[in-house]
Image (cartoon, coloured by chain):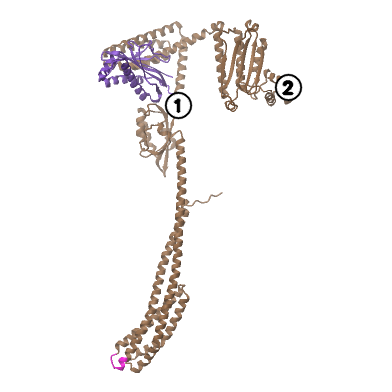
Amino acid sequence: MTCRELGPEDISIFSDAICEYFETTSGEKAQVRSAYLLEGDYPENWNDFHGIIPVHGDFTGTVCFSAPKQLLTHVLMLMGDSSYSDAAHLDLVGEIANTLSGRARKHFGEMMKISPPVAFLGKHEKIKTSRAGRPYAIPFTWRTYEAGLVVNLCTL
Amino acid sequence: MRKPKASKLGKYRDLVLAITIFLFLDMGVLAFNYYTSRLIAADTARINTAGELRMYSQQLAKAVLTLNYELANQQPTQTSLAQISESHQAFSEAIERLKSGLREAAGEGFSTAANSEAMEQLEELERTWAPLGREAVTLLGMKEPGVNDVTSIANLVFARNVRLMQLAGDLTETLESSALERSSTLQTIQLIAIGLAFLNFIFIIFKFVRSLQASDRIAEEARRETTRILETVQEGLFLVDREGRIGHQHSQTLFDMLDKALVPGDNVLAFLMERIEEKHRESVKDFFDVLFNKKVKPSLLKQLNPLQEIAFVPQDGKTRYLNFEFDQVKSGDQVEQLLVTVFDVTEKVTLARDLAHAEQRVKTEVDALLALLDHDPATVDSFLRGAEARLASINSQLASVRPEGPAYRKLVNVVARDVHGVKGEAAALGLRAIEMEIHKFESTLAPLRNRDDLTGDDLIPVAVAMNDVHEATAKVWQVIERVQHYANGEKRAAGDTDSELRELMSQIEHLTLRIASDLNKKAKIEIAAPPELKLPGSVLAFLRTTLPQLVRNAVVHGIEPAEERQRQGKPQEGTISCMITCDAEGTLLISVQDDGYGLSPQALRQTFAENGTLSAEEAASLSDEQIVAKIFQPGFSAIAEPGIHAGRGDGLALVHDMISRWGGTLKISSRPNTYTRFSLQLDKEAWQCA
């Protein structure tokens, strides 16, 4: 078992994946606005739609992407979708979570075992913090919208 | 004993010998053919010569008659005389040649009956010829022979020509017969020689094929063994040639260890350059330059080898730590190849790092503890709260920063100033761990300061560094909590017996597992006590003394080794049940039961007799109850040699002593190979009034 701590390069894997996803699908890259430690249950400006990847292995925890409905609707529109139902929005955050999952798999290899992404709507899921470290919250801006990423991983 | 000297030809000796014989036979057949052809030529020459004798005799007769006629008619005689001379000479020479030829044939070992007969016929022919020859010489010696001179030779010619021709014919037949006979013998010899050569050839083929098959079998077996070794060996094994190419034979684990995309023929140095950290690349290159140097000794190679516990990043991204060992494979005095052995030492390196990490953590905690003890708690508390407040403030600013370069720059400078203040306070208090983390934090901030092109991405390392400082302060808080917990311990002992009982149970559980582990046994303990049971401190002290002894006894003497339990059809893991209950009458019941050997009086008798605790006679004279009761007497143990966990015979004696002092009762019940249970009972008055 490796004991390496989660470094900036590990976290950047997720933020880069989000930025590039938006660039690929919309032609406009999302920008990381900042990075900070999550104090409460949710980051500020926590949104409605969430794509979450549960992780275990040498790192354990979750990586969660959250976006407001308007942002997702805009992306769906750019992608040529005509359905703007909640299901379509959930599919989209699920797809973004899938992208995160693929990047993580490539970067961490066997160190990280990733369960299938889960997409959900609403704020009922709290970010569970652990004693080993606080989750990292990374807000993004894309056009006029703001989305968020929470990397809540700790080493065993 | 002297070893037989190995032939230079080795396994090919027989084959070479057979081929040599084959060649000799072939050469012999060729030589014999040559010799045979010579004999046949000689035979043919003799047969021809014998045939010529008939012709010469006829010529002579004709020439004599012609001469006679020419003299009678007074015609010129030169031609006739010349023919007589030629015939005479040819006949005489033919006889000489035949004689010589027959003698040669006899001298060459072909003195057959036919040859002798031919010799006799030739002698007779010579005798018949001799008068005729002499007359011819006389005639040829005359200057001008007359009719009368020719008459006598003519008469001889008439008288002997037919005989001569008959003899010559017989001689020819005899020579032909002799030649045929000899030819037949030679053919037989030739056939035998060819037959032998053929047999020898068959032998060679047979031997060669068998030898090849045997070699193939050995080679196949060797190949199979090599494959098995390469499939089984855990290390990565492969050969590298002078061009750095990986050989085709390699252990199965090699490419799992290095990279599945790697194939034989790939350049190992180029591959390593892509997979190891940049700081090692130059030294690895230099090392590869000396690997094929025949003058470099193996011990020096080991010293120079930089590929030890080297971080290796394969395509799957999971860093491994590998050791590479190189052995030169020499041919003559040249290094032809390298045998490379790769060991995966990730676990070892990781464990070493874990250990170093744990040591560092302990050191940090000890440092923190020492630092705390040196200072007024209120000062430390104030510092920690202040530091956390400043970190919270920084975090808040990170969360709300505007996404603009100047705002980022301003924030980084504010953060740097704030944390520097915290660092100074931590240093003053001797909180080195916090000081060091903030120092690292400042190192992270340094390259960001005064940059106008900062983006949100640049704040990710800032957040990570801040988290590390948070963790460092959290550790100091933990140390403080422990100290406080320790300081409050006495208060708890005075009042909180519930938690004391829980702690005791926990200690008993750990003790059980530790003893089982030390004795290489598998055991678990089930502890049960009703939550409503309130025990006074004196009873807890009683339990603290007795329970460890009973549990220790159960693990050491009761639970069998896992293998034995398996043989008996029991679960490998033994179970010890520890129960503390109170019955309706208020009697406190404490029992410790194991599912092991059970108590056997007979086995105890034997053990006590063998370890000298009792004499054989004493042991035999005691009843079952008496012998079992001995286990509660000091110095009686069922183990010959005392160990750390048992063997001195004091444990159960102590339990017995305690229960006696409390006025309680102690019972044992047991069933061989099923269980042993020790039950302690304390009456309500005894334990509630204690």
Residue A85 percent coordinates (x, y) = 30, 15
Q: Tell me the shade of chain B.
A: brown
To which residue does mark 1 refer? B347
Residue B489: image location, x then y, percent: 53, 8
Q: Residue at x 47, y 10 (%)?
A: B481
Q: Nearer the viewer, mark 2 or mark 1?
A: 2
What's the amino acid at mark 1?
Answer: Glu
Locate residue B475: give its quadrant: top left
Can residue A10 be seen?
Answer: yes
Between A125 and A17, the one nearer to me in the picture = A125
- Label 2 to label 1: alpha-carbon separation: 58 Å
Q: Position of residue B333 (x, y in %)?
A: 41, 43
Q: Chain of mark 1?
A: B
* Chain given the colour purple: A
Q: Position of residue A8 (x, y in %)?
A: 35, 19
Q: Is residue B13 left or right of residue B246?
A: right
Q: In this view of the protein, which residue sits in the foreground, B421 or A19?
A: A19
- The residue drawn where x is 66% and y is 14% is B666
- Span colored in magenta: B69-76
Quarter of image, res B28: bottom left
From the image, tell me which residue sits under label 2.
B622
Q: Is residue B71 magenta?
A: yes
Q: Amino acid at mark 2?
A: Leu
Q: Earlier in the sequence, mark 2 or mark 1?
A: 1
Could you tell me which chain the residue with mark 2 belongs to? B
Q: Any magenta on residue B261?
A: no
Kindly state the secondary structure of the residue where label 2 is placed: loop
